[in-house]
Every structure is written in C-alpha cells, then in structure tokens.
Image (cartoon, rainbow, N blue to C red):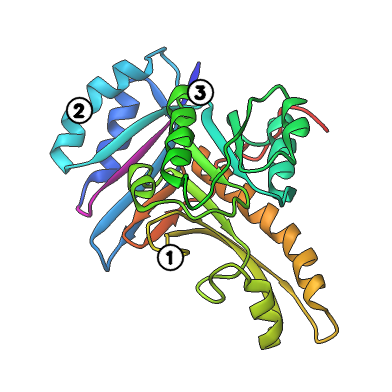
Amino acid sequence: MSKYALTVTCRSTRGIVAAVSTYLAENGCNITDSAQFDDTETGRFFMRVSFDSEEGRDQGELEAGFGPVADEFGMDAAFHDAAVKMRVVIMVSRFGHCLNDLLYRWRIGALPIEIVAVISNHMDYQKAVVNHDIPYHTIRVTPENKPEAEAAIMRVVEETGADLIVLARYMQILSDEMCRKMSGRIINIHHSFLPSFKGANPYKQAFERGVKLIGATAHYVTADLDEGPIIEQDTVRITHAQSASDYVSLGREVEAQVLARAVHAHSHNRVFLNGNKTVVFPASPGGYASERMG
C-alpha cells in the first residue's frame, strides 16, 4: 500500500474539498490527514491531503484521473509519493552548526531528504562531509569570478537532480539570475528575527539595541536580500548581562532548529507560496518520526 500527499492551490470557491475527497474515495484511497486554508484577503485556497492508495493505483494513474477535477477548479495540483525523498544540495561557508545538525537529522532519518552534495567556498567541512559518503565541492567565490562560480554551483545542482538548495550559513549573496531560476527552491537561514536586523551583522545590531529577544528566520531566497517569504522563525530570551558573544552562541541553537524545521516542512510539501508570504500546514501524524536512533 503506497502513501501519497496531494497539494492543491486554486481560487477559493465552493465544492473543492468535496471534489478532492470524492475523487480519492472513488479511486480506492483512504485519507489519513487533511489541512486546508482559505485566504479571504487574496481569494486563494490551499490544501494538503495525505492518503493511502489501498487498491494499488500508482502516482501516474492518480495524476491522469485527477485532470478533470483540476481543470474544473483551475487547480495547481501535484501528487507526491511519500517514499521518494527530496534531493537536496547544502551550501555552507565557515559556520558549521546548521550543516552538522542537518547531517545528523538526515543520518537518523528525521528528515525525509537525500543529501546529494555539499558545496562550500572553504575547505573546513570537507572531511566531515566525505565521512558521510556525500560529495563535497569546494567552489571559491570572489568578486572577479562570481559568474563562473555560480555556473559551477548550478552544474552541481543540475547534475545531481537536486530539488532544493539549503543555505546553511552560506555567506555569499546569490545573483538575481540564480534566485529567479531557483525560485521557491532555495531556503536560507538568517541569523536574526526578520524583518529586523538585516544584513551581515544582525547579532551586533541586536546587542547595540539592547534587545531582550534574539531569533532566527528561515525563508525562501529572492533577489531582494533577506526579504523572501518566511517559512519558520523562533526566538530565545536575552538579558542585559549577555555579551555580544553570548548572542552568537545562543543564536546558533535557534538557527539550527529553525532551519531544520523549515527543511522538514518543505520536504513534506507542507509549504505553499502565497504572494510575499507562505502557508505552512502542520505535519501529518508520524511526520516527525525517525527511522533509527542516534
């Protein structure tokens, strides 16, 4: 018995939920989890349904049969096989906490992804990555070679068939062209609680303002720096006694957790772009289970 998820985006109107559930029932599928959101401001409807194909219909059959339903409601719809893991390229510079956290979660099966490559502009984490039997690509980036470096990055993405790029504290600004080409397929972790404290030194900015909360933000990358649709955020409390270095250390844990939650949501097809915002549905039952311990 195969497990799938169906994601739907369309104009809000009556009968969508009924049409989807009727189609699945008539095709031998049992719904195990369903979430939907009707955005009254934009008139857009979002839906994610998890189901078991109890009578053996495969993804191709389900997609072909769903065509008339999708056409009737003008749906942008997709079926996702739960057994197929999303292929991910991770990019990192010299801060390795997010990379190491993702590698651990991947190793125990807590993230349903296949890490197909790690790209860095430094050599710091080559040994750690290669020890996981993951290809490591060192691609130096300078102001003079930026177009060539990005072309090399895109070759890795295309050759590995990657579905997603994760910027795990990759401290280089991507070009507008790359952002457009990979729209909705690059997740960045910003070491600040956006929209405050953008740019390269948010913890220093936060320290100088005497904030009582610091945080991290995972968002999709767009051509506008640190302005992409937000997927996940979290914070940690700070007091007047903490130093600027404390801010950095406390922030590391929040960054790793926020990025992992964003990757988890995206890889489970729980995130929907909604203009400059996102709709993020809760995980299905069993969605956080790991395949193995430690």
Please state if 147 lies on the left or on the right of 101 as rendered: left
**Precedes in sequence: disc 1 or disc 3:** 3
Q: Nearer the viewer, residue 86 or 35?
A: 86
Q: Position of residue 161 (x, y in %)?
A: 45, 25
Q: Amino acid at mark 3?
A: Val
**Precedes in sequence: disc 2 or disc 3:** 2
Nearer mark to the viewer, of 2 and 3: 3
Determine crowd level at label 2: few under 14, some 14-19, many 20+ residues with C-alpha closer than 10 A: few
Q: Tell me the number on the disc at residue 28.
A: none
Please state if 62 lies on the left or on the right of 193 as rendered: left
Q: Is residue 3 above or below residue 153?
A: above
Q: Position of residue 135 (x, y in %)?
A: 64, 25
Q: Is residue 8 magenta?
A: yes
Q: Secondary structure at mark 2?
A: helix
Label 2 sits on residue: 67
Label 3 sits on residue: 84
State the extent of the magenta-drawn residues as a range: 5-13
Residue at the extreme right of the image, as rendered: 241
* Picture residue at 25% right of the left edge, 38% below the top: 19
Please state if 83 lies on the left or on the right of 276 as rendered: right
Tell me where residue 286 sits by quadrant: top right
> Split into 4 quadrants, where in the image is the C terminus?
top right
| Any part of residue 198 in sight | yes
